[in-house]
């Protein structure tokens, strides 16, 4: 229960009743006064109780963690979720049994979880944040795979003089490919297509 509406002889009494029901203190809530109430004649006739709505303040990091926990539980996976907030970047690491189910083919399931959590986080947090989710050491392994793939395809492009289009991937993975080949003067890279089907193109500089 995150919110209650209570009544009392005055606003303070109504707030105290709400705090007791929520089992918290005033520092942890937002108070909305619906009706300040009214004292009746001689304290009897025409008396009207005060009405307040009291809502627990949301800890955005906790809320993001709970949101993600709900998602993975629906997928039937038992996990431990660690959350770090670093300068508007929320880093989340998931560990546990059968977590491979959360990764999917080439990280597609993990990327979808990351996108959904990103959208949820920016509804809960006033300032824009970036969400980065890792499962075990998958992201690091994927990074090494992309670096090797980019280098191998660059060699292929130079050898055949034919442009290569990679499979669609999220922006942070495309950046890995662009960065890997940024100092290779034999080739150039750019992105084409629309999200979520945007992809990297590698072409020989001899074609220019």
Image (cartoon, rainbow, N blue to C red):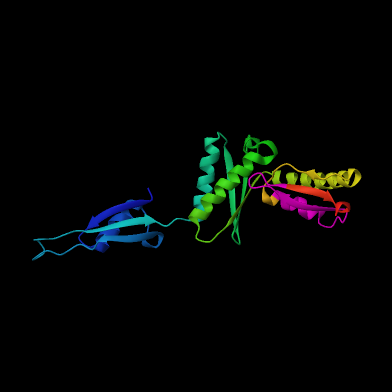
In the drawing, does residue 202 fall left or right of residue 97? Answer: right
Q: How many marks?
A: 0
Q: Is residue 86 above or below residue 78?
A: below
Question: Residue 204: horizontal and vertical position, in percent?
Answer: 86, 50
Q: Which residue is found at the position 53% from the left and 40% from the top? A: 71
> Which sits in the foreground, 119 or 124?
119
In the drawing, does residue 104 fall left or right of residue 200? Answer: left
Question: Residue 178: horizontal and vertical position, in percent?
Answer: 77, 53
Q: Which residue is found at the position 32% from the left and 52% from the top? A: 4
Question: Residue 149: horizontal and vertical position, in percent?
Answer: 81, 44
In which quadrant of the rendered view does residue 79 lie? Answer: top right
> Which sits in the foreground, 36 or 167?
167
Q: Is residue 126 magenta?
A: no
Question: Residue 134: horizontal and vertical position, in percent?
Answer: 65, 46
Q: Which residues are magenta?
A: 173-199
Q: Which residue is found at the position 85% from the left and 44% from the top? A: 162
Q: Residue furthest right?
A: 159
């Amino acid at each position: 229960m995150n919110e209650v509406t209570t009544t009392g002889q005055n606003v303070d009494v109504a707030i105290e009743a709400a705090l007791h029901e929520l089992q918290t203190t005033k520092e942890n809530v937002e108070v909305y006064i619906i009706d300040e109430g009214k004292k009746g004649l001689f304290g009897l006739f025409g008396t009207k109780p005060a009405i307040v709505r009291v809502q627990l303040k949301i800890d955005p990091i906790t809320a993001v963690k709970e949101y993600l926990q709900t998602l993975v539980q629906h997928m039937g996976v038992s996990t431990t979720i660690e959350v770090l907030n670093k300068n508007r970047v929320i880093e989340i690491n998931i560990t546990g049994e059968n977590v491979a189910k959360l990764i999917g083919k080439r990280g597609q399931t993990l990327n979808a979880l990351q996108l959904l959590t990103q959208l949820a986080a920016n509804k809960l947090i006033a300032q824009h944040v970036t969400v980065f989710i890792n499962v075990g050491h998958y992201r690091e392994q994927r990074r090494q795979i992309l670096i090797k793939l980019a280098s191998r395809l660059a060699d292929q492009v130079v050898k055949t003089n034919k442009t290569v289009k990679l499979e669609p991937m999220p922006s942070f993975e495309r950046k890995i490919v662009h960065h890997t080949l940024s100092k290779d003067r034999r080739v150039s890279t750019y992105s084409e297509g629309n999200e979520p089907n945007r992809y990297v193109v590698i072409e020989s500089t001899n074609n220019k």
